[in-house]
């Protein structure tokens, strides 16, 4: 996976564990128009705070320096200084302004970042930059992920081919109110900052903001997009024209691909579930209802146990804070209807639903019969392995 003007590198620096890729770099030959969305948690990691400041000031970046193994969160002034120091090390070796380096970390919260690991390995990291090492970046940012997550898209703008490539990590602590844990998009489109930021916010709201693994929001969540302009298209100055709309569509498509990869790789997950609430009073209402069901531990464990317990779904809807008539609700597992007007359908529906629950990807449809709007939230089941993974995450 390649894109003009960008190069990539990753090394096994020993930030926390030995002999595994854990520090990665994404670098552009020239400064890029750069936009980002970040965790809405009140507890923000040092790299999140620093990146927000740098993008607000410049709207540009040239390099992303990322690490796994340590979140550099809840580390106070020491953590902020560590983030600045690692960014300064990269900038000096690359010969660029340190304000053009964005930092990104994932891993254990509350532990000091191993700056020495960066110092010892920065020459190798920068020296190893190559257009062909994007997959190494994907592996270096993994924590409890079982597979790397990448995607690519192309589109034509004004007769020019525009490319986007993306990478994400995330498996647990996933219910963003902006993004998943970490995601980076590189594109060669020519675009101004304002439409790029607007496009990212919109596309993110319909993709990463619609996924949940466990209902927890990370201290380190971020999605960054860098646009180096190498495609040579007529500059995208607004999203209110065919070119702008086409770019947003491509960006939403690649973010949805990555976000669904995150859900499929949810910690210990055996099934991916799309919760679709339709015929709601508004899209916001539909999203709130769908998210409440998707986050229900009782619903998620029922899916893992392959128990067609639709009563748990109706009960979850009841605590979502949305007014509705429970005697109007229909519930389907794929095309098998389990509840009609808030009551059991009976007959062969339980047997049909039991067969659906054996599948790896399931559509749960909830018809509220209140209006015309709908929303989808993407989630996974809760398994015994989820508990095991998170019970000894630090060991």
Image: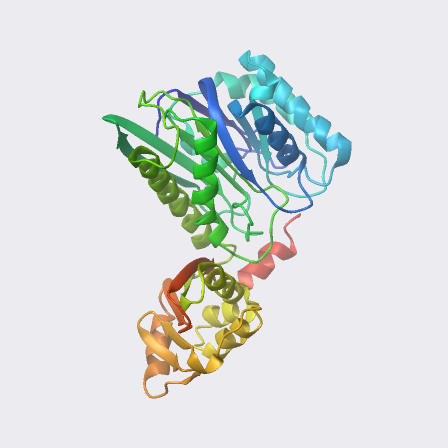
Quarter containing the N terminus: top left
Q: Is residue 168 shown to the viewer in this render?
A: yes
| Residue 374: image location, x then y, percent | 40, 62
Q: Is residue 168 above or below residue 173?
A: above
Q: Residue at 43% across / 44% down in the picture?
A: 203
Q: Using the rendered view, name the quadrant where residue 162 is placed.
A: top left
| Residue 323: image location, x then y, percent | 53, 72
Q: Using the rendered view, name the quadrant where residue 87 is placed.
A: top right
Q: Using the rendered view, name the quadrant where residue 246 is placed.
A: top left
The residue positioned farthest toward the right in the image shown = 77
Q: Residue at 66% across / 38% down in the picture?
A: 45
Q: Is residue 262 above or below residue 77?
A: below
Q: Residue at 55% across / 74% down in the picture?
A: 318
Q: Is residue 324 above or below residue 212?
A: below
| Residue 375: image location, x then y, percent | 42, 60
Q: Nearer the viewer, residue 121 or 211?
A: 211
């Amino acid at each position: 996976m390649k894109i003009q003007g960008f190069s990539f590198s990753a090394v096994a620096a020993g930030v926390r564990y030995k002999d595994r890729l854990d520090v990665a770099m994404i670098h552009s030959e020239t400064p890029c128009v750069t936009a980002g969305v970040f965790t809405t948690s009140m507890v923000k990691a040092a790299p999140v705070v620093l990146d927000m400041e740098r993008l607000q000031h410049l709207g540009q970046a040239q390099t992303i320096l990322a690490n796994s193994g340590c979140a550099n969160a809840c580390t106070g002034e020491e953590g902020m200084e560590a983030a600045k120091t690692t960014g300064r090390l990269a900038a000096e070796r690359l010969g660029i302004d340190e304000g053009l380096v964005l930092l990104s970390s994932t891993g254990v919260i509350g532990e000091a970042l191993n700056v020495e690991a960066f110092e010892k390995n920065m020459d190798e990291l920068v020296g190893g930059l190559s257009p062909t090492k994007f997959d190494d970046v994907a592996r270096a940012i993994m924590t409890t992920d079982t597979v790397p997550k990448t995607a690519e898209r192309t589109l034509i703008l004004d007769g020019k081919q525009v490319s986007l490539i993306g990478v994400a990590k995330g498996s647990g602590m996933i219910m963003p109110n902006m993004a998943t844990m970490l995601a980076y998009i590189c594109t060669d489109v020519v675009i101004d900052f304002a439409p790029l930021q607007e496009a990212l916010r919109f596309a993110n709201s319909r993709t990463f903001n619609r996924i949940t693994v466990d209902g927890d929001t990370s201290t380190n969540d971020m999605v960054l997009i860098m646009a180096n302009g190498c495609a040579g298209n007529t500059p995208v100055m607004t999203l209110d024209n065919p070119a702008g709309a086409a770019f947003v569509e491509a960006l939403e498509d690649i973010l949805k691909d990555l976000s669904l990869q995150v859900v499929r790789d949810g910690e210990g997950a055996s099934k991916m579930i799309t919760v679709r609430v339709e015929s709601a009073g508004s899209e916001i209402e539909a999203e709130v209802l769908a998210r409440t069901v998707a986050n229900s531990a009782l619903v998620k464990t029922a899916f893992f146990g392959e128990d067609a317990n639709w009563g748990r779904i109706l009960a979850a809807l009841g605590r979502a804070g949305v007014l509705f008539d429970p005697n109007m609700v229909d519930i389907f597992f794929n095309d098998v209807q389990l509840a009609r007007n808030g009551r059991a359908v009976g007959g062969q529906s339980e047997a049909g639903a039991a067969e659906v629950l054996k599948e790896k990807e399931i559509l749960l449809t909830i018809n509220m019969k209140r209006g015309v709007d709908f929303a989808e939230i993407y989630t996974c089941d809760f398994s015994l392995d989820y508990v095991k993974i998170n019970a000894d995450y630090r060991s």
